[in-house]
Amino acid sequence: MEESNPIRKLVIYFKKNLEKGYTEESLKVALMNQGYSRTMIERAAEQLHQDLARTAPILKDKPIIKHYIIDENDQPITIKKPFWKKVFG
């Protein structure tokens, strides 16, 4: 089932080729070389961004990153505060 809307066709073209690993800029240049107008390509790119934003998952929690210093025996090392930090800070 092929759609008659040319912008929708370009959005589908963008999606297919982005999945293949092409960059958006290289696809825009290729489409301009094929004779598509810059405004039509930009509208299709905006539509693509809107479609991708609708399907993107919403992150609810931020990941917690913890850093550990480990010695040669794979034991975590606790860093002690210097004396002056204990007194003044």
Image (cartoon, rainbow, N blue to C red):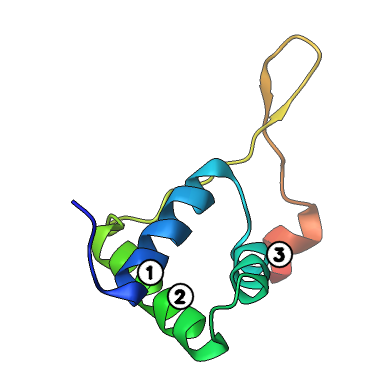
Q: In this view, does 36 lie to the left or right of 73?
A: left
Say whether disc 3 or disc 1 marks the residue closer to the N-terminus: 1
Q: Where is residue 26 in the image (x, y as percent from the top left)?
A: 68, 64
Which residue: 81% across, 13% down? 72
Q: Mark 2 points at which residue?
A: 45
- Which of the pair 9/24 is nearer the observer? 9
Label 3 packing within 10 angstroms: few (<14), some (14-19), many (20+): few
Quadrant location, the C terminus: bottom right
Q: Mark 3 points at which residue?
A: 87
| C-beta proximity under 8 Å, tags 2 and 1 | yes
Residue visible at 41% across and 76% down in the picture: 44
| SS of the residue under disc 1 | helix
Q: Nearer the viewer, residue 83 or 14?
A: 14
Q: What residue type is labelled 2?
A: Ala
Can I make out residue 50 in this image?
Answer: no
Report the Cα–Cα distance between label 2 and label 1.
Answer: 5 Å
Corner quadrant of residue 34: bottom right
Distance between mark 3 and mark 1 Cα atoms: 58 Å
The image shows residue 47, relative to residue 21, as above or below, that is below
Dots 3 and 1: beta carbons under 8 Å?
A: no
Q: Nearer the viewer, mark 3 or mark 1?
A: 1
**Residue density around tag 1, few if under 14, some if 14–19, many if 20 or more, within 10 Å:** many
Describe the element under mark 2 as helix, strand or loop.
helix
Q: In percent of the image, x 42 and y 55: which residue is there?
A: 15
Question: Percent x, y for residue 32?
Answer: 63, 76
**CA distance separating discs 2 and 3:** 59 Å
Q: Amino acid type of disc 1? A: Leu
